[in-house]
Image (cartoon, rainbow, N blue to C red):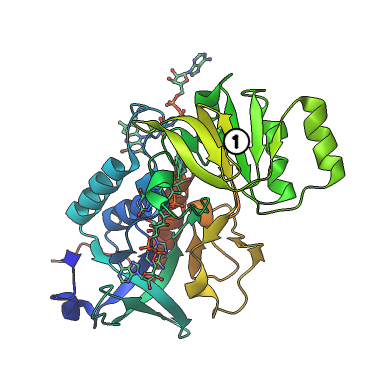
């Protein structure tokens, strides 16, 4: 059932088998499996997540390489609802471990918000990350290219940059190192720091040895049309010619709601899991970009399958068998 501020009261007394935080690629896969195991689950999705901005899913077997993330989100949401999952548009603020259950506090509505609390036996953390983008006064100018010809994921889109003139936008020296991976796909790389970091002489020398120019002035605006980049104008008036780019500025992790849970093992901002996507907490699972591993749709989808199946096993093994009784 689709929940909203109007009808969510009907579910405040429900003890869900699992609450899935994030209805993206991994969360929707988990919901489809949970629902088909006959388990009660609630997917909570804030909107504007990473897979929504994925304009083309390039490398998923069986799907056209121009399939946009939003189509998969719509389809997966509808399918999971059809199988019996609940779905709520809202922002998970906090998860509290009550021993046998979790209390999941949700902000519903960006204005005149209400803060219902839902309960579940298990929590699946499927809230992902979002790539940091260069902040310009006119963000629309960035959004016109980000996700189209200005990429954020080399595994996803390196192929689409093959032998093109590319900018690498990096905000730390570590991120500048991506140039020496990106050169697998193209050697025509200009590195832009957008004025965000100091570059050591050692790195400058390495870039020079490879023939990759370095520009340290902040970006003024992106040039191009129809989402196709043609160049980048810097605040000092320089125009760097490029038909594609890679943003390597790190990510923001949607994991704040778990910070009150004791004993969770982290690797940096990523959750560490076992091979069934269980975290170091027996009743919390983590999927996709939020867990340690490759950030790919195929992985997130498989993770959803694994987590849902392990939760089903746990619940099934603890229930009494159904007998054929008249
Ligand atoms: P997501 O799909 O991002 O889902 C997480 C969801 O959680 C989001 O919808 C978010 O809104 C929600 N959320 C976050 N916090 C909260 C909260 N507190 N409360 C409620 N909801 C919350 N991958 C590929 O395999 N191939 C590609 O070609 C490819 N291209 C890409 C292109 C772009 C431009 C981008 C940005 C990504 C691309 N990716 C690609 C990566 C892919 O999008 C991710 O790896 C994948 O979506 C990860 O799935 P996920 O379920 O972990 O996270
Ligand atoms: P969020 O981080 O989603 O939310 C901020 C706060 O709002 C939360 O802390 C919470 O308190 C509240 N909130 C959020 N959702 C809810 C809810 N459902 N109910 C109640 N409260 C809620 N953004 C664009 O706008 N346009 C683009 O064209 C665009 N293109 C992008 C392309 C790429 C490749 C990438 C990586 C990102 C893109 N973004 C785009 C995303 C942009 O960078 C921001 O991540 C996004 O706009 C943030 O949305 P938000 O302000 O709602 O923040
Ligand atoms: P496969 O897809 O079987 O690929 C292995 C290939 O290797 C085969 O095409 C085979 O011909 C070939 N091969 C084998 N030996 C050799 C050799 N020596 N030389 C050359 N080629 C060889 N899964 C789901 O997730 N959801 C479902 O709803 C679902 N429904 C199913 C319904 C049916 C009727 C069946 C039979 C399976 C279903 N499955 C379903 C399971 C799913 O098909 C498998 O899990 C999946 O195909 C496994 O992928 P794979 O690549 O390991 O093997």
75 and 13: which is toward the camera: 75
The number of discs equals 1
Instruction: Measuring from the top left, give residue 241's x and y in whole percent.
Output: 56, 27
Q: Please, is residue 83 above or below residue 54 in the view? A: below
Quadrant of the frame with the N terminus: bottom left
Q: Position of residue 30 (x, y in %)?
A: 37, 54
Q: Residue at x 32, y 56 (%)?
A: 31
Instruction: In the rendered view, tell whether residue 195 sits above or below residue 188.
Output: below
Q: Which residue is mark 1?
A: 238
Instruction: Give the camera-side residue of 188 and 239.
Output: 239
The x and y percentages for residue 217 are 64, 46
Question: x, y (%) of residue 108?
Answer: 27, 74
Extreme residue toward the front, this view:
237
Considering depth in this image, is 326 or 235 the residue closer to the camera? 235
Residue 9: quarter of image = bottom left
Looking at the image, in which quadrant does ligand 2 appear?
A: bottom left
Q: Residue at x 86, y 43 (%)?
A: 201
Task: Write down the quadrant of residue 147 in the picture.
Answer: top left
Q: Is residue 144 above or below residue 82?
A: above
């Amino acid at each position: 059932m689709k929940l909203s501020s109007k009808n969510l009261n009907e579910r405040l007394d429900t003890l869900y088998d699992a609450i899935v935080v994030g209805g993206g690629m991994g969360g929707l896969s988990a919901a489809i499996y949970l629902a088909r195991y006959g388990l009660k689950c609630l997917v909570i999705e804030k909107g504007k997540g990473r897979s929504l901005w994925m304009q083309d899913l390039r490398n998923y077997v069986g799907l056209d390489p121009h399939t946009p993330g939003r189509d998969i989100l719509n389809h997966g949401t509808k399918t999971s609802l059809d199988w019996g999952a609940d779905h709520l548009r809202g922002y998970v603020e906090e998860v509290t471990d009550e021993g046998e259950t979790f209390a999941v506090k949700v902000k519903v509505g960006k204005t005149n918000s209400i803060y219902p609390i839902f309960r579940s036996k298990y929590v699946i953390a499927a809230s992902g990350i979002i790539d940091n983008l260069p902040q310009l006064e006119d963000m629309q100018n960035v959004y016109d290219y980000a996700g189209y010809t200005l990429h954020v994921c080399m595994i996803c889109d390196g192929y689409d940059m093959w032998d093109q003139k590319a900018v690498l936008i990096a905000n730390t020296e570590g991120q500048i190192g991506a140039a020496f991976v990106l050169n697998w796909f193209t050697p025509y790389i200009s590195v832009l720091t957008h004025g965000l970091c100091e570059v050591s002489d050692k790195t400058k020398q390495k870039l020079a040895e490879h023939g990759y120019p370095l520009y340290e002035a902040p970006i003024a605006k992106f040039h191009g049309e129809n989402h196709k980049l043609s160049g980048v104008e810097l605040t000092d008036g320089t125009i760097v010619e490029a038909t594609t780019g890679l943003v390597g500025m790190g990510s923001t992790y949607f994991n704040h709601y778990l910070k009150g849970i004791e004993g969770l093992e982290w690797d940096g901002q990523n959750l560490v899991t076992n091979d069934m996507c269980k975290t170091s907490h027996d009743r919390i699972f983590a999927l996709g970009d939020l867990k340690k591993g490759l950030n790919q749709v195929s992985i997130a989808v498989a993770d959803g399958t694994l987590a849902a199946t392990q939760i089903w096993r746990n619940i099934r093994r603890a229930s009494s068998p159904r007998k054929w009784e008249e």
